[in-house]
Image (spheres, rainbow, N blue to C red):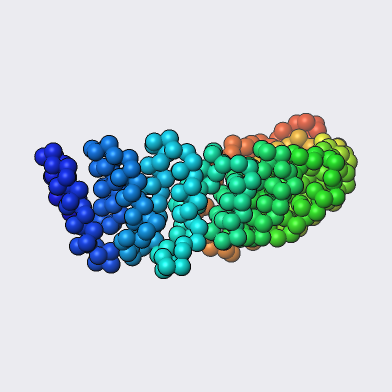
């Protein structure tokens, strides 16, 4: 039918094109239609009146016949919603702003009893029409009508997270701050975790609240942050903990800020704990000093998995070295050695190697080599994928063991003792 109408238009036969579409309305049944939507027939007829005939009233009457009078029975709500949206866009094209807003409001209102059926009742849940109405209310309506429209879409349980965010942003722009916070509260109630929109709503809520009140309503702000981090899944909580800690640093107490970072370390998933402990330790150094980080390093090493725990041991050792506590640094390296397979984590042993060259002696260096051999023997009982071991292992250029012993001996002014060979035993590699 649309092709037939198009052919008539190409031949300049406008009236025949209109007649073809009018005949199509009687012939095409929505439940049996194929190769397109029946709404195309109605928009096509309205378009002919609008563009070819330049008859605005006739085009409007087409939309009124199908939308308001229910002249055609559709099988899909979206088909009828397309026509309502087309009617609104038609009014906007001709700058009839009040008519456009009125039509948009009618599209989602309850139909009259005589027109009420499954399709017309479904219009009240059409996102297409609600989005159109909300946009027009913000542009053409008043503040009160816009608020009413947003409240209606929320009460109808059709609202999406973007609707809640737009509503709160609209209220904030017009200085209705407490009402915007109520909108956020309704949003977090409608979309709780683990809904993907919950994180967006909570983030906007906390940012808006802290921007509005800053440090003037600290207890209320803390309550919001506590609620959020309590119900937030661990894999999404890092950003909220960082914001909470930053708020306490800026407006609250240092003790509370460090407590927030400590809770973050215990809450986040294992793959994020290492970074969390690094931040916690850095903040502790800033506010309490380096020596206060010793128990934090110990807790971090106990809580982390093998490889990040070994990295934490290296950082612990570097911290003790900067304080001149060489024995403490060596103890940290010795503890971390049991977590670092020399074949998979050569960097750890290279760092210990350099530490002993700079701070140790021949005896401590030999002890490091003994520990390395024993750890390598312990890990050799585990079967590793050779490709996995080879890929990603960094190449670290270090001194050989013999060369390192020679440098230590030269620095201390002693001779390296040659181990006597005993008959009947195999001389091990140095």
Q: Is residue 369 above or below residue 249?
A: below
Instruction: Using the rendered image of the protein, determine whether residue 294 is visible from the camera's viewpoint.
Output: no
Please identify the quarter of the rendering in which residue 378 is found: bottom right
Instruction: Using the rendered image of the protein, determine whether residue 38 is visible from the camera's viewpoint.
Output: yes
> Measured from the top left, where is residue 154 in percent x and y?
60, 57
397 or 200: nearer the viewer:
200
Tell me if 219 is positioned left or right of 373 in this view. Answer: right
368 or 148: nearer the viewer:
148
> Measured from the top left, where is residue 47 in percent x and y?
28, 43
Q: Residue at x 17, y 45 (%)?
A: 15
Image quadrant holding the N terminus, namely: bottom left
Tell me if 44 is positioned left or right of 355 in this view. Answer: left
26 or 342: nearer the viewer:
26
426 or 229: nearer the viewer:
229
Q: Residue at x 78, y 31 (%)?
A: 411
Q: Residue at x 26, y 48 (%)?
A: 45
> Measured from the top left, where is residue 258 in percent x and y?
83, 47
> Measured from the top left, where is residue 199 in percent x and y?
63, 52
């Amino acid at each position: 039918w649309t092709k037939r109408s198009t052919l008539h238009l190409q031949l300049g036969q406008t009236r025949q094109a209109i007649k073809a579409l009018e005949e199509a309305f009687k012939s095409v049944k929505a439940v049996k239609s194929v190769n397109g939507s029946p709404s195309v027939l109605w928009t096509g007829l309205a378009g002919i009146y609008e563009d070819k005939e330049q008859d605005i009233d006739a085009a409007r009457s087409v939309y009124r016949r199908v939308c308001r009078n229910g002249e055609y029975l559709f099988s899909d709500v979206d088909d009828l919603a397309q026509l309502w949206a087309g009617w609104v866009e038609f009014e906007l094209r001709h700058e009839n702003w009040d008519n456009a807003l009125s039509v948009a409001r009618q599209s989602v209102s309850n139909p009259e009893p005589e027109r009420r059926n499954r399709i017309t009742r479904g219009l009240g849940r059409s996102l297409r029409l609600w989005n159109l109405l909300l946009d027009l209310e913000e542009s053409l309506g008043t503040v009160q009508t816009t608020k009413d429209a947003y409240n209606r879409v929320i009460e109808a349980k059709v609202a999406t997270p973007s609707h809640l965010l737009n509503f709160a942003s609209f209220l904030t722009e017009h200085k209705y701050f407490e009402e915007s916070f109520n909108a956020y509260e309704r949003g977090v109630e409608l979309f709780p975790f683990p809904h993907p929109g919950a994180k967006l709503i909570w983030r906007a809520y906390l940012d808006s609240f802290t921007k509005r009140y800053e440090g003037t309503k600290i207890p209320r702000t803390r309550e919001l942050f506590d609620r959020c981090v309590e119900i937030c899944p661990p894999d999404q909580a890092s950003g909220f903990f960082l914001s909470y800690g930053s708020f306490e640093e800026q407006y609250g107490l240092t003790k509370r800020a460090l407590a927030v970072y400590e809770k973050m370390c215990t809450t986040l998933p294992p793959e994020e704990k290492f970074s969390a402990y690094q931040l916690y330790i850095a903040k502790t150094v800033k506010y309490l000093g380096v020596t206060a980080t010793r128990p934090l390093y110990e807790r971090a090493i106990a809580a982390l998995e093998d490889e990040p725990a070994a990295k934490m041991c290296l950082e612990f050792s570097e911290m003790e070295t900067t304080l001149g506590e060489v024995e403490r640094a060596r103890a940290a390296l010795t503890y971390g050695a049991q977590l670092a397979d020399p074949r998979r984590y050569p960097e750890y042993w290279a760092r210990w190697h350099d530490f002993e060259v700079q701070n140790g002696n021949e005896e401590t260096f030999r002890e490091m080599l003994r520990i390395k051999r024993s750890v390598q023997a312990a890990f050799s009982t585990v079967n590793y994928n050779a490709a996995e071991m080879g890929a990603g292992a960094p190449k670290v250029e270090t001194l050989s063991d013999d060369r390192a012993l020679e440098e230590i001996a030269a620095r201390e002014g002693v001779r390296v003792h040659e181990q006597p060979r005993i008959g009947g035993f195999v001389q091990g590699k140095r």
